[in-house]
Amino acid sequence: MKVAYWPGCVSRGFTPELHGSMAKIAPLLDIELVEIDRGACCGAGVIAEHNQELADTLNARTFALAQEVDGAALMMNICSTCQGAQSECQERLDANADYRAHVNQTLAKEDLSYEKGLSNKNLLWLLVEELGLAELRSRVCRPLTDLRVGPFYGCYIVRPAPRLGIDESRPRDEYLGLVIEALGGTVIEYAGSHKCCGFPIITMNKEASLQQAGRHLGDAVDAAADCIVTPCPLCHLNLDLQQPLAEKVVGRKLKMPVLHLPQLVGLALGLAPGELGLQRHVVKPTAVIDWTTSVVAEVGASTADS
Amino acid sequence: MEFTLRLRRYDPESGDPAYWEEHTVDLEPHRSVLEAILQAKALTDGSIGIRCSCRAAICGSCGVRVNGQPGLACHTHLDKAQRGAPDGVIEVEPMGNMPVIKDLIVDMDAVHWKKIRRVTPWLQPKLPVPEREYIVEHEAMVDVTQSMACIQCGACVSDCLSMEVDRDFIGPAALTKAYRFVGDPRDARTGERLKDLAEDPHGIYDCTHCFKCIDACPKGVAPMSQIMRLRRRAGSDFHIEDANNGERHERAFVSLVRRYGLLNEAELLPRSYGGDSTLAKFKPVAAKELASSLPAIAKALLRGKVTPTTALKPHKLAKRDLAAIERIYDEVEGRDERLELNLYISGRDEDLA
């Protein structure tokens, strides 16, 4: 499957292991990534907060670039925040022909134009809806048996539900659990899975921001999770990079490894932890990886489960 | 058709902890969760505490959580609630972030109304007061109609994730009320209101942008969008440089994307504290903040997560794309008026309905 691939900013900046691990798993899932390397930052809601039309125009430009990729089935992103911020802009662009024409007029100087109805899916949605869980399961060569994984979605990919196309027939707010199961892992339910990591207010109210991160990580610890997995690199910054500070704010040791979604998928597909950049995290994923043998959790076997 | 409810019961006067209790009712599937609660109360246990009045999603009295989601009991159909219940039993509990008075009744005075009062929820008119009515342009009021649709049910307050960790956060309902007057052309205190809300450490910049209130609201008010409107007016129209770094963060973010096309995290942090300049990191306020983050930064460098190159030499787009982005910025920001499409007001094109 050929996709117009939008990596976002953070995956190429402060979480390079996300972009890197996506590149590693793509060929194993027969996903051909055609990177949109000319698009601007989605704005993460902040540009829209400043000027809505500016955010809509920048993202319409990215959408137009994606639509120019020959033979691409859809646009794929690897960031919950990109998904939410772009979906918000797309909702307005798709809802009103006059507004779309107005925005396209700004893009016309570059000979670009956005046509309504683009399909823009996070890797998580693509795994379930395009590749399919059965197919994903069939490609697992090192099942995550006995690995207890807590999902952490990131706000932007689960709310508001109507905008993100979440309903009874498409429970996208449950997909992480489905993927963890398909990879052979055990899904851990805990209070914080769909809550906010606190990242957006880290510069405005650091205490409250780290309280949020620390609280959810603590809930995952209490539910005896080995690690948590997230499709959002911004959540990863607050949950992993800031975890030492979050520990101080909530006054408890957490030591909770936080994996990017493609890293978890990559482990189950047989890739080595080093290839997936797991050594780059602030909280070492020792619960997930036996570093001497590169074997997942306590499981020594590397047999397929199907 | 039979439905089973699992109600959260609590009577503080009893001294006993809260507990769950199941009731089975017989109602048509399109009837509401409120009607089911009232039937259980009428037929099996008169002591069940629930506050309600209009039963038509107008009065805002029956805010509860159904299957963990905040909303109005009278506005939730039984069949839909049952489909949303993992074990088929409809779970009803009191709203969050507010103390429970009894069973499903929470203390709205202690939290919700206190916060509403905090934002001076009345018009402070321009002087002199006209002899008869103020005449305003019809269009001038369209912008605030979404905030006026609020029925004060507290569903957004219930699940506000900022309030969960910061009890002092003014919160989605009260800030929506604030926008109702900030956006009103008859009000004389727009600037003062915005300054007050921007400078309060628990004001507009304390919202963590989690969209919980948008999903919670049974009336489509989208409180978070109103908070973003308050920020937009405070920052772009009144240029209020608040003590919470809110305006600086926004300005730094917007200008970094203009310059590099992509977000440059290493520059965003110091600029959010020290102002929108490459020298920001050397300002005392930024340096102090960066020093407190030093352990995290050092560890990130150590693990090769962040390399000195990525930290100092930011990724950016190619020249021609940067030129295009700059042109878009100039064109859009150069307009006489900011263009804002609010789908609540404009609706959607019919072919999408």
Image (cartoon, grey):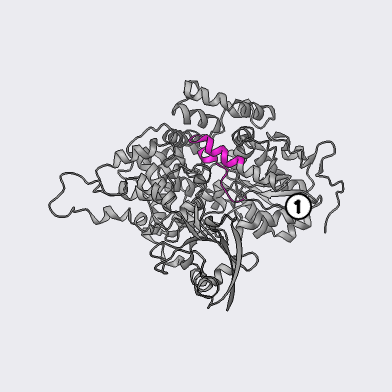
Q: Chain of mark 1?
A: A
Corner quadrant of residue B88: bottom right
Q: Is residue B76 left or right of residue B187?
A: right
Type of residue at label 1?
Gly
- Dot 1 falls on a residue whose secondary structure is loop
Label 1 packing within 10 angstroms: few (<14), some (14-19), many (20+):
many
Residue A203 image position (x, y, % from top left): 50, 34
Residue to which mark 1 is pinned: A185
Viewer-side residue, B192 vs A14:
B192
- Figure check: A50 above or below B341: above
Residue A100 image position (x, y, % from top left): 42, 55
> What's the magenta region?
A193-214
State the quadrant of the C terminus of chain A: bottom right
Residue A200 highlighted magenta (yes or no) = yes
Viewer-side residue, B349 vs B246:
B246
Viewer-side residue, B120 vs A241:
B120
Q: Residue at x 49, y 64 (%)?
A: B49
Q: Residue at x 62, y 50 (%)?
A: A193
Q: Is residue B272 left or right of residue A75?
A: left
Question: How many labels were placed on the picture?
Answer: 1
Residue B201 image position (x, y, % from top left): 43, 36
